[in-house]
Amino acid sequence: MIRASIIIPTYNRADVLLLCLEAVSHLNADPSTFEVLVIDNASTDNTKKACADFVKAHPNLSINYIFEGTQGVSYARNRGLKEAQGEFICLLDDDSPPTPEWLDSLLRPFSDPTVGCTGGQSLLDFQGQKIPDWLQGDLQGLISGYGLPFTVPTEVSRWEHYPLSCNMAIRRKLFGELGYFRVDLDRTGSQALAAGDTEMADRIHKAGWKVIYVPDAPVYHFVPLGRLTKEHIYHIGRGLAESHIILTSDRNILHIIRWFASDTWYATRMFFWFVMARLKGKALWFDDYMRFWMVAQRIPFRVKTILRGHS
């Protein structure tokens, strides 16, 4: 019986995909208990051949290559869900190789029948590159760094604590009950929307299931040089602002006014803390600036939504 289906979406990154698959081949879990679904999201490089060669070299693993022509990571994950056979859906990114204990640790909390979702750390792997001084703090979350200050599996219920889709497991039956990943909340090409995973975890929590953070189920997330720039941080921050607008879209004028007022109030507060950080000479003042900037970005998006919906 296949207990877990590991879904790995990939797009034009055959080299890092192979590193991820190699790490999967070294999992401590019994290979007969899991399958791997590589979802090629319309790659134009040698992903298909690289995957075929890997499958040939690892006959003990159940690896299925699946082509999904509609661009978008949620389309890829949802295609994997339709093909999966396991009781649990385990999600990895192609640039997030797991540690040997990852799968066993991630699945262990499901012995509690009230657990619907688990997730573990995403440890950034800078591959020997120098980390800019301004990127030493909370901004690492914008390049997929994730970890919570718990040493034992712990239930979480706050949006900012929910696991990321580069390291996440969900009972497969919940997708039938609650629906698949929203395709309007995740990356498509150069678009940097990024909330499909946390929205799914929030949906699971609101349906009465536990979401568990598992500290001993880490993956390593590769950080290429191009992500160590402020331009990339702004790009991701703008995508998060857009994602928030999509999540809170509502044609009810009272709700729109409430969200507009909330954004304005939080932007004002964040600007105050940014100014204080600069006045105090805080080394990581850019963290405070980005908190302000990301909330402030929502205001013009909110205005556009109001004008578009009531023109």
Image (spheres, rainbow, N blue to C red):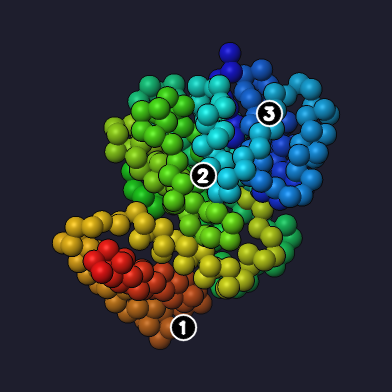
From the viewer's side, name the closer residue of 252 and 178.
252
Disc 1 marks a residue whose amino acid type is Gly
On the image, the x and y values in percent for residue 27 come to: 68, 30
| Secondary structure of residue under mark 1 | loop
Disc 3 marks a residue whose amino acid type is Asn
On the image, the x and y values in percent for residue 223 come to: 66, 58
The disc, 1 or 3, on the residue closer to the chain's N-terminal end is 3
Q: Can residue 269 be seen? A: no
Answer whether labels 3 and 2 touch (C-beta < 8 Å).
Answer: no
Whole-number angstrom distance, CA of label 3 to CA of label 2: 18 Å
Determine the residue positioned at 39% across, 72% down: 297
On the image, the x and y values in percent for residue 64 come to: 68, 28
Q: Is residue 121 above or below residue 187?
A: above
Whole-number angstrom distance, CA of label 1 to CA of label 2: 42 Å
Q: Quickly name the residue at label 3.
A: 64
| Secondary structure of residue under mark 3 | strand
Q: Quadrant location of the C terminus?
A: bottom left
The crowd level at tag 2 (other Cα within 10 Å; few <14, some 14-19, many 20+) is many
Q: Quadrant location of the N terminus?
A: top right
Determine the residue positioned at 25% across, 56% down: 250
Q: Quickly name the residue at label 2.
A: 74
The disc, 1 or 2, on the residue closer to the chain's N-terminal end is 2
Disc 2 marks a residue whose amino acid type is Ser
Q: In the figure, is residue 234 to the left or right of 26? A: left
Q: Is residue 54 above or below residue 250?
A: above
From the viewer's side, name the closer residue of 16 and 213.
16
The disc, 3 or 2, on the residue closer to the chain's N-terminal end is 3
Q: Quickly name the residue at label 1.
A: 281
From the viewer's side, name the closer residue of 172 and 266.
172
Instruction: Kindly identify which numbered label has been placed on residue 151.
Output: none
Determine the residue positioned at 66% across, 34% down: 66
